[in-house]
Amino acid sequence: MLDFKKPICLALAAVMLAGCGTDTSAGTPAATADTSGTAAPAAAETPAAQPEATSGANGKEVIVAFDADLNTMDHHIATDGNSFIMQSMCYSGLTSLDEAGTPLPELAKSWDVSEDGLTYTFHLADATWSNGTPVTANDFVYGWQRLDAPETASEYAFILDTIHVVNAAEVNAGEKPLEELGVKAVDDKTLEVTLTLPCDFLLGLMSFPSFFPLNKEFFESQGDQFALSPENMIYCGPYNMTGWEQGNAYTFTKRADYFNYDPDAVDTVIFRFQQDTQSALLEYQSGNIDVVKLQGEQVDQYKSEPGFTNRLTGYMWYIPVNMTVPALQNLNLRKAIHYAIDRDTIAKDVLMDGSIGAEGEIPVELATGPDGKDFRASAGKITEFDPAKAAEFYAKAKEELGGDVTLELMFEDSEASKAVAEFVQAKLKEYCPGLEINLNSKPKKERLALMKEQKYELGITRWGPDYADPQTYMDLFLSTNVANNQGRYNSAKYDELVLKGTTGEDATDSAKRWADFVEAERLMVAEDFAIIPIYQTGGAMMINPDVSNINFHSASVDDYRHIYKK
């Protein structure tokens, strides 16, 4: 068995990916489709055109302020958006995503898909690692095996089974050897991936860090030091990591020998950890930072300024009602809470950061369906704010439960979560007379742990999509998903609908699969009221007007790899 173990200090809280783009799925690929064509970047097709060591150097630098620190540069251990962004600077996948989230060739210069959609054959470009050794198909095999290996204990191992890679679940459970995972090197430049079912969004996911390759010789030479410093890493992307100041700044310098070299991209990108947004904004105004997030009143103050940018992220904030709490098993009480939440006011007047009120559990602009429409357009708005209904259903619940109810609302200790929790508390008391809500603030890591163990009643949490498909949300609430189904929602009908669309009779029919998800979401949110969506996070920020070509993706990793600066 290969030794993939990592030091215990790299264990992370279960904080999932936020921040990513429009639709990365391109529908069911055409049989034996060669995608190199005109979509492939010219440099990917002509490795002989690689620049000299100093070619294209422009001395330009961009500094990006992040309000959360780097957790790890190990792409099989990471679970948070900022770590994924930085890993994507210096690693590449088989594909990359354009501004619209469409998968394009990267380390794979082209690919073929079998007529039944079960075999993908990727033809690799002539790329090298930063030590000069070629990137080969075996690097992908080794990387995917490490991701799935039980001893790695990666929280993202599930994603191999999500795209239906042969034997992924069995290998991860230790029931089959790593060698039986459905990925193999036909030769150094040909990678073959076999599936049990077709996957509409596979090509987009090939740009996700969990699927990046890993150089076996280098990895094993580092032992437990792998990815703990720039010296303990080897790179296959457009930048090398050249500076690591934990809790402060992380520096990435452009690789002149990258096969798909972009001479116009800035030479240096620095991600600076600056939690205080007001201080970061002052640094932006002084010209010391190029990209900074805005919060609260800052948005209104700067929305007319040059460089103001607003985008929707894929993060959905919601209340997973704890169905193990006796009072919350009452349907009328859950209905009352749902109708008492003024989602639009929370977004516009409480958060003021470009967020929008949730229309359902699936975010706006997550993915486009087989009908060519966004999922939310197909499913419609299934949340509703109605104070009269809230009072009516609470009165019914009070009668059924034998008196007024007192509940605790848990939230994490951030300014935004505190403001939302206080607003929800006030409105529940106002629209459901007699309902008492006690607030309980916890650090994020502790909140996640307590909710995972059902040690809460109502809790405000979030999920960010791992890929551009509703399944990334639908899987959360299956009765068998003990890791993420925090409220223990248990509906045989919901399970049946989701599984029919993911692994059952509708899994190979995109239209039927989509319809299953629409029905399942409506059942959970608007009939069982087990999940109470609140808002979808906005991303208001200031970007130096001289800086361009940052690709934001609501369902994948934001791309800072091709930043231009005048």
Image (spheres, rainbow, N blue to C red):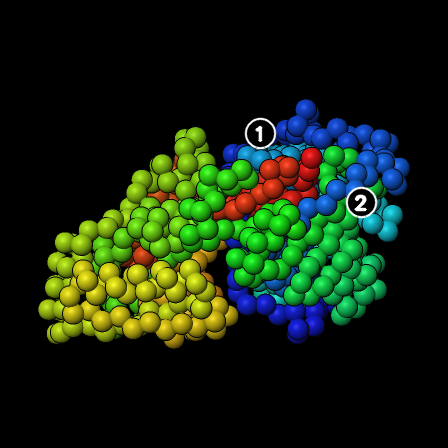
Residue under the point 46% across and 56% down: 463
Q: Quadrant of the N terminus?
A: bottom right
Residue 441's place in the image compared with 423, above or below, is: below
Apparent side of residue 112 relative to residue 537 in the rendered image (left or right): right
Residue 139's place in the image compared with 121, above or below, is: below
Q: Quadrant of the C terminus?
A: top right
Apparent side of residue 203 relative to residue 57 in the rendered image (left or right): left
Residue bearing the label numbered 2: 255
Quarter where residue 273 is shown: bottom right
Residue under the point 43% across and 30% down: 372
Task: Identify residue type, mark 2.
Answer: Arg
Helix, strand or loop status at disc 2: loop
- Residue 210 in the image: x percent, y percent? 63, 53
Helix, strand or loop status at disc 1: loop
Mark 1 vs mark 2, CA separation in Å: 35 Å
Task: Identify residue type, mark 1.
Answer: Ala
Q: Nearer the viewer, residue 238 or 198?
A: 238
